[in-house]
Amino acid sequence: MVLERAQLRRVILCLSCEAGLLPEHPSTDGENRKQDCDEPVRKGDLNRQPWNADATANHAKTPTLVFDSATLVQIRLSFLSKCGGQATLDALCWMWHHGGEGENPMKNELCFGLIGAGRIGPVHAESLAFRVPHARLAAIADLKQPAAQAVASRCNIPKIVSSGAEIIADPAIDAVAICSPTDTHADLIVAAAQAGKHIFCEKPISLSLKEIDRALAAVESAGVKLQVGFNRRFDSNFLRVRQAVVSGEIGTPNLFHIVSRDPFPPPLTYLRPSGGIFLDMMVHDFDMARFLMGDEVEEVFAAGAVMIDPGFASENDFDTAVVLLRFRGGAIGTIDNSRKSTFGYDQRVEILGSKGKIASENRYPNQVIVSGERTVYSDLPYNFFMQRYTDSFTAEIQAFTEAVLEDKPIPVTGADSRMPVVMALAAGKSSDERRPVRISEVSA
Ligand SMILES: NC(=O)c1ccc[n+]([C@@H]2O[C@H](COP(=O)([O-])OP(=O)(O)OC[C@H]3O[C@@H](n4cnc5c(N)ncnc54)[C@H](O)[C@@H]3O)[C@@H](O)[C@H]2O)c1
């Protein structure tokens, strides 16, 4: 079933009008188009399969409309509360984005179940519910029901359960988004793969290489797709840095630096199960090192310190760390991590090449510069990952959705999900033994 773009616009126009969002339709000729929409689209129409294009045929005049994404979200929310037609409106949005061409979009919608409604779960829930047009979030699970309920009501998720197993057992669900703690990931991946579900899993798969290999083997044998949440690969600044390396714009990369500092430390109870600074925090930067340089690291030399909170020492962890990386191609680089940066989330990258350098600075909520008699200053950068990396979180799960729907390769491979953990384990060994450690020394 193919709808023309103009018909789609009319349908969405009707929905928005009915939802009270557009009392008067904007139009290119300035006329009030309210009368075009006297025949509202009803729930029965929207749920009919295939979509009945004739239902919109009476809307003869088609105002030229451009909805921004915030308006679309509003339309969707209002419409959901009216008649629960999420799938159909998603399909309309999909077709609109694709110019009304292609197959019936109902076959091109990926139905997700999300596991874990803590810190990162709601970030992905909002992307799936509001920002990825051809995804649908049908269910959410959390051991803590109030946490799941809060996300469900905010994101209009119709089904709330308490365990990942219930999500995996649901035949209506095509893909799971695993956002529960790291020690649950491998078992959930294996169960989801065996149930034939595609899998988006937060980083890392596990702190143990054996567990990662068990999960990757289950994915391989089930033939499903798996993507791990190394979201920074999808950040537009870092993509531009990568492009400069790939295109040769800065020549051969010689020196590489990442600064990656959190605004404040996590509670001490978070530390032990997290695996410590190298596995929990620097694992993102290890992934960025491979991704941006396009080269593998062969040796790491790590040093850690406790400079912020003595509680880190009692948890056998560091709150401050530096790692020197030696790449196979001969380049060297550093990553520095701190659990506390008083001025906000400090996320910077620089690569020096034979023909120049490329640098990515912090991101700010605004670009304002205040100039006074003695100083020139700006406001602080984004405070933490939820704000700084919002777009990349959406882009990564959108890329996963498209890779599944269009049967394309997943942009973050199984090897990509494993190697940063190998590097983190090597860094831990290096700081314990106070010597450079070759990657080949760390095995499963
Ligand atoms: N990509 C990133 O930038 C990023 C940021 C934060 C966290 N993470 C990763 O996301 C994962 C979750 O981290 P978080 O900070 O959101 O943790 P969290 O503790 O805030 O939330 C985890 C939630 O999962 C629930 N849960 C635990 N076991 C469960 C189970 N078996 N079934 C269903 N629900 C269960 C908990 O009740 C909790 O609400 C970790 O692997 C972490 O490394 C990634």
Image (cartoon, rainbow, N blue to C red):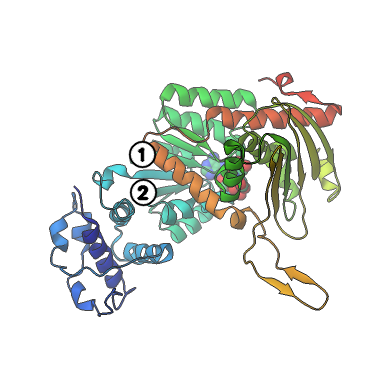
Q: Is residue 7 above or below residue 359?
A: below
Q: What element carries label 1?
A: helix
How far from the left and from the top, in percent, is residue 334?
Answer: 77, 38
Observer able to see residue 99: yes
Picture quadrant of ligand 1: top right
| Residue at horizontal 30 percent and vertical 78 percent from the top | 23
Type of amino acid under label 2: His
Who is closer to the viewer here, 96 or 118? 96
Q: Determine whether, in the image, residue 164 is placed left or right of residue 80.
A: right
Q: Which mark is residue 370?
A: none
Bin the neighbour count of mark 2 within 10 Å (Cα to Cα): few under 14, some 14-19, many 20 and up: many
Q: How far apart are marks 2 and 1 (CA)?
A: 9 Å
Find disc 2 in the rendering and name its residue. Answer: 134
Q: Which mark is residue 405?
A: 1
Q: Determine whether, in the image, residue 87 is placed left or right of residue 307.
A: left
Q: Is residue 62 above or below residue 299?
A: below
| Residue at horizontal 80 percent and vertical 72 percent from the top | 375
Who is closer to the viewer here, 121 or 10? 10
Bin the neighbour count of mark 1 within 10 Å (Cα to Cα): few under 14, some 14-19, many 20 and up: some
Observer able to see residue 167: no
Who is closer to the viewer here, 41 or 393? 393
Quarter of the image containing the C terminus? top right
Who is closer to the viewer here, 425 or 256? 256
Q: Which quarter of the picture shows residue 210?
A: top right
Type of amino acid under label 1: Leu
Marks 2 and 1 close (CB-CB < 8 Å): yes
Q: What element carries label 2?
A: loop
How far from the left and from the top, in percent, is residue 394?
Answer: 49, 50
How far from the left and from the top, in percent, is residue 151?
Answer: 49, 56
Q: Which quarter of the picture shows residue 155?
A: bottom left
Of labels 2 and 1, earlier in sequence is 2
